[in-house]
Image (tube, helix red, strand yellow):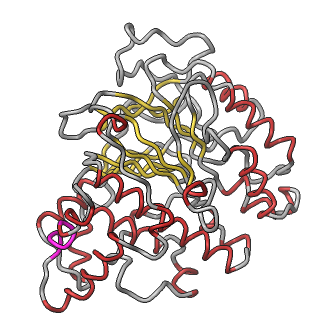
Amino acid sequence: MTLATRAPRHARACNTDPSRRRLLGAATAAIVAPAGYAATALAAPTASSAGSARRFGFGLIGDIPYRWGEATVLANLVSAWPTDLDFAIHLGDLKAGVGPCSDGLLESRARILERSTIPLVYVPGDNEWTDCGRVLAGAFDPLDRLAWLRRRFFVPPFHRGRGALAVHSQHERDPVHGLPENLAWTRGNIAFVSINLPGSRDGEAAKLPAAQQQARRRANERWIRAAFARASAMGSPAIVVAIHADPSMQIGADGPLSGRPPVDAEQRRRDPYLEFRRLLFEMTIGFDGQVLLVHGDTHRFRDDHPWRKLAPWVERAGYPLSALARRRLETLRRVECFGSPLLGAWVRIDWIPGREAGFEVSAQPIEPAGANEPAARRPAGQSPTLPRGPRNATRAESRG
């Protein structure tokens, strides 16, 4: 089924009263053919390449290593992943905000990730590039640091570690405007997409050139739209969006991104992630499947549905929502990984076909190298007792 035949679902997700038809038309058009879409769209996989629906698991880590000794913790973890994991994602911040962003330090972090026993996809954090202009970080040029990361991490096969994972880069699809660090892949029939969305107020604190910031944001938008379009075209029951920054999901969104004036400088100063949340809102109500957002940045384990109570607020802001749109907003799920100094555990996410919740999220203890039990002795998603230290239960609390 082509996206064009599925697009009306987006229109049905909101009430089509006359005052909103123009907005919905613009939103639907943006999903079908946004500016630059043709250059960045991913071809929908065939039935054979998409794979059959099956259970699989992946690891989620980030904001590590920061302090002395944490590099060893990370090295031990990635060197001994459970054998039943398919891949892992590092959600950025390979160093603390202080300390030099030197080639040597970044290279030492890259070599740790290379030790991963499974494919490991890396999402850039602010500490590796936007914050490198700080005096305490060595007063490096942030754009030079980003260029270094691109040369080291974002070249084929676009993941670190052992094993195979078919990862695609936006730059492959659009060599002129695409970002090498914006990635997409699938596992079974579940779609994954990552973009360069750093903390530190989306890099605004670094005083980067406005044109560069705008180009990155527009590339991020095109890549997210392309990923949702591909997931829809392949009939995926879920899509996972991976970013570094905590985008202030608790603030919510005041409607879709399409059909409204661009965010101005004052709005961005007050809320640097407003555009992203509007885009995620638009994509969520238009997607016939589960949406899982994973991020790092604030270093605390969270598993919640941050937009469960968003619909009434959006409607008061002037955007009527259908029952379908409400349900899709309510089921959007967010998972944040552990971060320094709470390093007694990592996050495991399992996709379980046929289960209403789809994803099972659990915290797994970081064990000494070689201590991981075989898959037969530790069922996927089952969490041993966590060691003392992290103030968490083994399973993340669901917060509405």
**Residue drawn at the location 41% of the way across and 18% of the way down:** 384
> In which quadrant of the rendered image does the N terminus lie?
bottom left
Tell me the magenta residue range. 9-14
* Front-most of residues 42 and 128: 42
| Image quadrant in which the C terminus is located | bottom left
What's the magenta bit mostly, secondary-structure-wise? helix
Residue 183 position, x and y percent, is: 54, 50
On the rendered structure, is 3 left or right of 252? left
Indicate the quadrant where residue 277 lies.
Answer: bottom left
Where does the image place residue 266, in percent across and percent down from the top left?
Answer: 56, 87
Residue 12 location, quadrant? bottom left
Residue depicted at x 67% and y 57%: 126
Is 86 on the left-hand or right-hand side of 319?
A: right
Q: Foreground: 87 or 392?
A: 87
Please tell me whether residue 17 is drawn above or below residue 92 in the rendered image.
Answer: below
Q: Position of residue 10 (x, y in %)?
A: 22, 68
Picture residue at 49% right of the left edge, 84% below the top:
263
Query: Is 286 situated left or right of 203 in this image?
Result: left
Vertical placement of residue 273 versus 22, above or below: above
Q: Nearer the viewer, residue 7 or 212?
A: 7
